[in-house]
Amino acid sequence: MKLNELKAGTHAKVVSLGKDERFLKRITAIGLTEAAPFQVVKNDRKMPVLVYVRETLLALNRRDCEKIEVSEVKA
């Protein structure tokens, strides 16, 4: 499942970040890495997706969220 498909309040972990090296460097630099647990704070249409990861609130654009594979976890 893609990150942009999760609803607010969902706990999940990153499964895959894709293979684009430039994207990988940028997204890992802000703290989102494979196997990182996170919570979706807000996911409204046409707005950035807000996620809470590593004690940081991140706003991710929707195009980037389509590249991130995740799996839900029980809170």
Image (tube, rainbow, N blue to C red):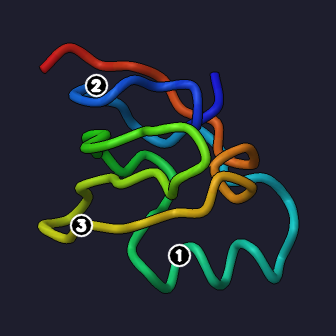
Task: State which tag comes first along the sequence, 3 or 1.
Answer: 1
Task: State which tag comes first along the sequence, 2 or 1.
Answer: 2
Residue beneath disc 2: 10
Q: Percent from the top left, x then y, of residue 11? A: 26, 29
Q: Percent from the top left, x then y, of residue 64? A: 69, 59
Residue beneath disc 3: 57
Question: Can you name the residue that lies furthest to the front here?
Answer: 46
Q: Residue at x 25, y 44 (%)?
A: 41
> In this view of the protein, which residue sits in the foreground, 8 or 21?
8
Q: Residue at x 36, y 51 (%)?
A: 36
Q: Amino acid at mark 1?
A: Thr
Give the left or right position of residue 55, taking residue 66 as reference: left
Q: Residue at x 42, y 39 (%)?
A: 43
* Crowd rating for badge 2 (residues with CA inside 10 Å; few <14, some 14–19, many 20+): some
Give the left or right position of residue 7, taking residue 73 as reference: right
Task: State which tag comes first along the sequence, 2 or 3.
Answer: 2
